Image (spheres, rainbow, N blue to C red):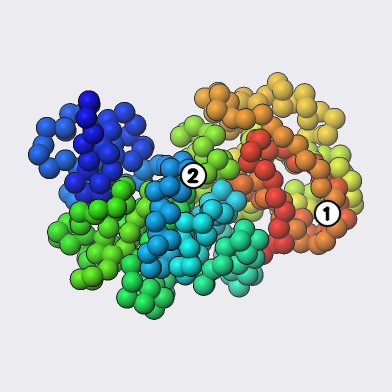
Amino acid sequence: MDYTIYCQGCGAAIQTDNPDAVGYMPKTSSKSENILCQRCFRLKHYNEVQEVEMTDDDFLSMVSHIRDKEGLIIHIIDIFDTEGSLLKSLPRITGNNPILLVGNKMDLLPKSTNKRKLVHWIRSLAKDAGLDVADVYLISAEKGHGLEELAFQIEAYRNKKDVYVVGVTNAGKSTFINRLIKRSTGEKDVITTSYFPGTTLGFIKIPLDRTTSLIDTPGIVNKRQMAHYVSDHDLKLITPKNEIKSRTYQLDSGQTLFFGGLARFEFIKGEKQSFVCYFSNRIPIHRTKLENANNLFEKQVGELLSPPSKETLKLLPDMEESTYKIKEDNIDVVFPGLGWISIKKGNATIRVYSPKGVSVSLRKSFM
Ligand code: GDP
């Protein structure tokens, strides 16, 4: 294209190169008068919100005008990957607008999860990241759990103003919004009411009433998300589909656990104890002696130690190691986007390996 065309729906500049980016339109459909990007097209005709990606910088420059508006911010995070999905840059773009932090994919956590502790932990995580949140809710957008309560609270908090939904890609933003659309309009004939040409670049507006809208912002790409470093095939393997079943290993010091070849846990020093592992069932766990671990990894990564597949290996950063002396009891060692290991008894020294940039973190266990 030699001149810029804008989408009639969201105002984004139309491009035909990148299906995952804002303003994408397949080349074949460029003849129509009423030009819509694929995302707006799908919303209009199928009433379906499709995710598009943006880098953190694109996002910042595009959405920082929210700062100057008044509205409620709904920040959707993936409860299974809080590291990868909590937006530390949020206050810069939302100004003084109230934020509801919504932990999605609750259906993946074991039923024994202590929700009160989990909410408390999410609050402290947000606080550490400099996010001042009005409230925290737990939902499963896919199963529809917690949505009634959340919808009720949104009405209360929004104070008759617009609602902005923000989140990284893969947190479940589209699933959530599609649920909301269905919920408020019923299954049929939603098109005319849900599709509203917007004037804000790249945003999609879904009317809530005569004067206010729910505004979907494009999904942000966070480099700390494991999802960006694995093939689509492997992403399916590492993402649990259903409630995670824990797998428990009794380890002596000097033993290693491999989670496929994507994460590695070494028990360096401490009394024999059990380590409870919460990972997708489709990630195989291998136990070996510390002294064999390097050799095994070098020979078997992508083979016996898989995922990663060969395809993922091309995307995956090198492994980075860190050592922790754990003093307290009941600590989780979190491999972002993959899962975590609960350690009941403190006074243990461990060494962990994870892909560079997707760093391991520790938290108080909420099981
Ligand atoms: P978006 O990129 O933030 O719009 O995320 P999507 O809505 O496309 O969801 C990303 C992935 O997470 C998809 O595979 C969804 O099926 C899945 N997903 C979304 N919500 C839930 C949920 O509540 N529970 C589970 N288990 N998976 C979910």
Amino acid of disc 1 = Ile
Judging depth in this view, the residue of 191 and 144 nearest the camera is 191
Judging depth in this view, the residue of 321 and 4 nearest the camera is 4
Q: Which residue is mark 1?
A: 326
Q: From the top left corner, tell me how far across and down residue 140 is, in percent.
A: 45, 61
Residue that appears at 25% across and 49% down: 10
Residue that appears at 12% across and 42% down: 34
Quarter holding residue 318: top right
Is the N terminus in the top left, top right, bottom left or bottom right quadrant?
A: top left
Q: Residue furthest left?
A: 33
Measure the alpha-carbon separation of dots 1 and 2. 34 Å
Q: Mark 2 near ligand 1 (CB under 8 Å)? A: no
Quarter holding residue 262: top right
Is the C terminus in the top left, top right, bottom left or bottom right quadrant?
A: bottom right
Q: From the top left corner, tell me how far across and down residue 285 is, in percent.
A: 67, 40
Q: Which residue is mark 2?
A: 56
Mark 1: secondary structure: strand
Say if 310 sits above or below 160 in the image: above
Tag 1 and tag 2, C-beta contact below 8 Å = no
**Around disc 2, counting alpha carbons within 10 Å, would you say few (fewer than 14), some (14 to 19), or many (20 or more)?**
some
Residue that appears at 22% across and 30% down: 3
Q: Is residue 46 left or right of residue 99?
A: left
On residue 15, the disc is none
Say if 88 sits above or below 222 in the image: below
Judging depth in this view, the residue of 94 and 123 nearest the camera is 94
Judging depth in this view, the residue of 76 and 328 nearest the camera is 76
- Whether residue 94 is visible, yes or no, is yes
Amino acid of disc 2 = Asp
Say if 100 sits above or below 352 in the image: below
The earlier-in-sequence mark between 1 and 2 is: 2
Q: Is residue 26 left or right of residue 32?
A: right
